[in-house]
Amino acid sequence: MAMEFSLRFQLPQLRFHQNPRKPQFRKIVCGLRGGTRKPLWRSRVLSTEAIQAVQSLKLAKSSMKLEEVFSSKVSRLLKSDLLDTLAELQRQREFELTLKVFEFIRKEVWYKPDLSLYSDMIMMVGKRKLIETAEIFFSELKEEGLEPDTRVYTEMIGAYLQVGMTEKAMETYGLMKVSGCVPDELTLTILIRNLEKAGEEELAKRVKKEIEKYVDSPRKFLAEVEKKYYQKDDRSTLFDSSQNFTKIATLLLKNICDTKR
């Protein structure tokens, strides 16, 4: 029995290795910018190399150090990691670094003009009201042999409206339709909300009349647009009112305290 006991516990334990799980992938679509667009594939989790590249770029405080990071880290990234790095810098709103990485990508051997990349760049600079840079990107994509799609036109319309260039926004909207691109719900929402906000009621009405051509349920769509628009205004008004109430209450309490003294 003693020998049997010892043999039993001297036998090595066998471990069965499971097959490694295949990496999962997902499509990345920027915010509410939907519609038909060329998908930009990226891994679910940033690779170690991409994370190190992002951190190194952010820590580079001089142009010389930045060049070193590009030559030692960024230039060694695989295509997918480089695209991940660009997307992560955009997500972190690292404007200058995003522009530099985008220019670096355009010089890579494997680079092919991509509308989704240009759309993201136009959206980014549009939010910062850098309309001249947005126009440069718009021109460059055409120089690279691309034809603007619905999303590119929408981003340009949004960029113009951001800086109050209503005429250019409507002109771009017209070019969009002439080119054969169909305005989607995002395009129409951006136009209607911003035109009404700017007091351009006639232009807003003109856009609303065209909704039937592009939206399946025009009334429902308009109701949703107005509902969200007015809810936002109501929230801001309520916030202002609460602030005023707080100020008045504070003054009243101060007066009461002064009177008691």
Image (tube, rainbow, N blue to C red):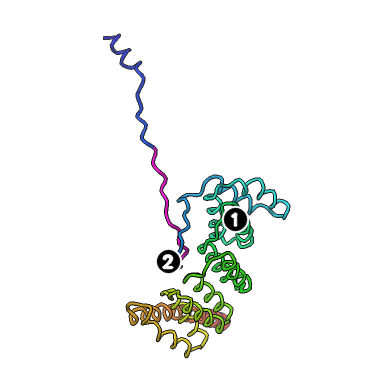
Q: Amino acid at mark 1?
A: Ile
Residue at which label 1 appears = 105
Q: Is residue 70 magenta?
A: no
C-alpha separation, residue under disc 1 versus residue under disc 2: 23 Å
From the viewer's side, name the closer residue of 140 and 158: 140
Residue at which label 2 appears = 36
> Which span of residues is magenta-colored?
20-31
Quarter of the image where the C terminus is located: bottom right
Where's residue 244, x and y in %?
51, 82
Q: Amino acid at mark 2?
A: Thr
Q: Quadrant of residue 257?
A: bottom right
Residue drawn at x 33%, y 17% as measured from the top left:
9
Q: Element type at marker 2?
A: loop
Residue drawn at x 56%, y 49% as measured from the top left:
51
Q: Element type at marker 1?
A: helix
Question: Counting other residues with Cα less than 10 Å from the Cα at mark 1, is it few (<14), some (14-19), or many (20 or more)?
Answer: some
Circles 1 and 2: CB distance less than 8 Å? Answer: no
Where's residue 56, x and y in %?
63, 50
From the viewer's side, name the closer residue of 134 and 126: 134
Q: Quadrant of residue 136?
A: bottom right
